Amino acid sequence: MAEASKSPLPSGQQWGEGDPARPLYVPAEVKQEADTRARAESRTLATVIREGLTLYRHGHLEPVKPKRAPAGSVGGSKALPPTSVRIPPVEWARILERCTSDKQQLGFLVNPSRIATQFLRDVYLAAPPAEKVPAEDSAPNRSVYIPEAVKSRAGRKVKDEGRTLAAVIREAFTLYRYGHLEPARTFRAPAGSIAPDSGPLSITVRVPTVEWTQMTQRCAADAERLGFAVNPSRIAAQFLGDVYLDPEELDAPAEE
């Protein structure tokens, strides 16, 4: 039986706040190094891990067969204290489905703990460290402007899924920051709308300073490269219209 969807949280709340906690097991040496870096960025290890799981759900992290690990590390006995990551049921179900499919296709064990470990070791820690961020600027509210018709339809879908629109927009930002969302000059507009960028409505999204800085720097570089304006609002609207919403959902009547 499917889980009943819960009421969406206010858009300004932290990514994952209020969602069920999922225990993930990461080898001590990887966990310690990643946690140290995340703290320097005024982020949590759980937030960083959730980025990895987001990339995996969207097909941008291919599982690799791990080297033999000692007992108590990822995939072994649960001797190490787990890292708790809050993930809504709809996202967790998709992660588990993908793990099962990848296990059958690749012929070795794939689970969320292994995906988290692989992302931390091979992606997050392999990249140059970001500049340190003062703790008081950890996750300010950011105003993102979304076309009214897109926001209405996406808002209806996230409500059915028991998520928030802000959480889905954070997914868009994660994909974009890691180079998996190419800005488009135009994106799909809902049926009956005049233009995809008309009638914008703001939504509050809490984004850590280090992530927002990476976003705006990438937007500036893409705007110069592509020759048209690129900003976080455009990235969010493009993701909602072209990736998150199916064509039939986009063309459905908007809520009154």
Image (spheres, rainbow, N blue to C red):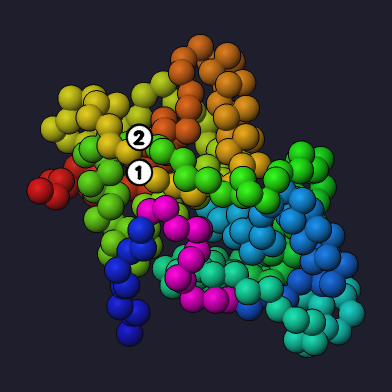
Task: Give the labeled residue for mark 2.
Answer: 145
Categorize mark 1 by other alpha carbons within 10 Å: few (<14), some (14-19), many (20+): some
Q: Residue furthest left?
A: 256
Q: Which mark is residue 235?
A: none
Displayed quadrant of residue 235: top left
Q: Specify whether 66 is left or right of 95.
A: right
Asked whether the residues under the numbered discs 2 and 1 touch, taking CB atoms below 8 Å apart as contact, a structural biologist would say: yes
At horizontal 61% and vertical 28% (from top left) the residue drawn is 218
At horizontal 35% and vertical 35% (from top left) the residue drawn is 145
At horizontal 54% and vertical 18% (from top left) the residue drawn is 223
Q: x and y percent of residue 153 in the render?
A: 24, 48
Whether 171 is drawn above or below 103: the answer is above
Q: The N terminus is located in which quarter?
A: bottom left
Task: Give the labeled residue for mark 1.
Answer: 203
**Label 1 element class:** strand
Main secondary-structure element of the magenta-colored stretch: loop
